[in-house]
Image (tube, rainbow, N blue to C red):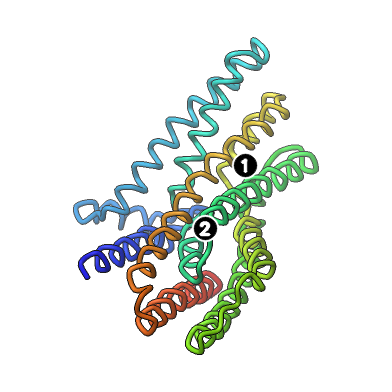
């Protein structure tokens, strides 16, 4: 019983950690003076999550400074050791950047809580989301840059707003589907019916659709890097750096996905010998994930 409680606490902790950015300031929007004054007044009551976000923001600033330094060195000295160091810092930047608000952590935890999936699916999901996320930011920035001769962040913000609406509309539909699908699977479990591998193809498609839906929102972090590289006439270096940023972000998101998969599997394993309790645990965990996906999508769309 004590082990069961510990595992439930782990699942709850992952949810709380992933949910905290939902209520944080939108990283794509402009910060108002009112919000900054409020945040300064509430420094004494700062939460652990706010402290983490503040720290990651500071780390990102430091890493961006290093990235800018090595981009300038590449322009002066050409591709060499500076380029390799740039790629290392780009990977590190992605790793830290994905810890900040947004980047699909909440939806990821909710999605993997909503059904039984393998660890490899967590890796595929994390890297698919972040590759699409980084490339969409780079692509939109390049289009703006070459058509308007300079990248205007206001246009990028508008693009983010539109893609965010599309993204969460798709995710909302997926959440509703999972709600009904999980109940259907629960009824099968109740009657001792196992779907076996028949749903594998459909689950794989759902996973990729969800991953792409999350990732289509452009990443401002990658936009910042590509703009700096473009201004230094280093497009190829910038694109390769963006790929390494995506690898770093993918690793962070995959850790959230795998953590949820392992925690959920451990909870279900503890009640595996009691069919009635297993069904209740499965339904509770999976429907909690589906309901969270629906709730978060509605919050972001309203």
Q: Residue at x 49, y 64 (%)?
A: 112
The reply, left or right, for residue 8 in relation to residue 33 is left
Q: Residue at x 22, y 71 (%)?
A: 1
Label 2 or label 1, whichever comes before in sequence order: 2
Q: Residue at x 39, y 70 (%)?
A: 268
Q: Residue furthest top?
A: 77
Task: Give residue 94's mark.
Answer: none
Judging from the image, what secondary structure is the residue with disc 2 in? loop
Q: Residue at x 68, y 65 (%)?
A: 205
The reply, left or right, for residue 34 in relation to residue 129 is left
Give coordinates of residue 260: x percent, y percent.
43, 60
Q: Quadrant of residue 87?
A: top right
Give coordinates of residue 158: x percent, y percent.
64, 57
- Mark 1 = which residue? 223
Q: Is residue 111 above or below residue 224?
A: below
Q: Nearer the viewer, mark 2 or mark 1?
A: 2
Task: Give residue 104's mark.
Answer: 2
Along the line of sight, the residue nearer the viewer: 175 or 113: 113
The reply, left or right, for residue 104 in relation to residue 76 is left
Distance of label 2 from label 1 (alpha carbons): 18 Å
Give coordinates of residue 300: x percent, y percent.
52, 69
Along the line of sight, the residue nearer the viewer: 64 or 97: 97
Judging from the image, what secondary structure is the residue with disc 1 in? helix
Q: Quadrant of residue 21?
A: bottom left
Give coordinates of residue 22: x percent, y percent.
43, 63
Q: Is residue 222 above or below residue 72?
A: below
Q: Is residue 272 above or below residue 156?
A: below
């Amino acid at each position: 019983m004590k082990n069961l409680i510990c595992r439930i606490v782990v699942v709850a902790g992952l949810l709380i950690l992933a949910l905290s950015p939902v209520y944080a300031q939108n990283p794509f929007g402009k910060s108002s003076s009112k919000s900054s004054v409020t945040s300064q007044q509430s420094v004494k009551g700062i939460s652990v999550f706010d402290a983490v976000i503040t720290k990651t923001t500071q780390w990102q600033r430091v890493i961006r400074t290093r990235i800018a330094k090595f981009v300038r060195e590449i322009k002066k000295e050409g591709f060499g050791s500076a380029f390799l160091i740039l790629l290392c810092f780009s990977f590190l930047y992605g790793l830290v950047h994905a810890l900040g608000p947004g980047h699909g952590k909440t939806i990821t935890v909710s999605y993997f809580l909503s059904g039984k999936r393998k660890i490899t699916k967590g890796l595929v999901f994390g890297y698919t989301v972040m590759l699409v996320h980084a490339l969409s930011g780079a692509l939109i920035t390049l289009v703006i840059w070459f058509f308007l001769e300079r990248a205007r962040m206001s246009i990028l913000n508008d693009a983010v707003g539109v893609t965010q609406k599309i993204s969460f509309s798709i995710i909302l539909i997926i959440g509703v589907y999972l709600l009904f699908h999980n109940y259907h699977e629960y009824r099968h479990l109740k009657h001792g019916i196992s779907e076996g591998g028949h749903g594998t193809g459909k689950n794989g498609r759902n996973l990729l659709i969800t991953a792409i839906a999350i990732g289509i929102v452009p990443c401002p972090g990658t936009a910042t890097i590509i703009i700096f590289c473009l201004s230094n006439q280093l497009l190829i270096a910038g694109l390769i750096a963006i790929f390494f940023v995506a690898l770093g972000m993918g690793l962070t998101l995959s850790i959230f996905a795998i953590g949820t998969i392992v925690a959920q599997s451990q909870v279900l394993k503890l009640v595996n010998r009691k069919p009635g309790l297993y069904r209740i645990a499965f339904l509770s965990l999976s429907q909690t994930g589906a309901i969270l996906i629906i709730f978060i999508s509605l919050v972001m769309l309203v």
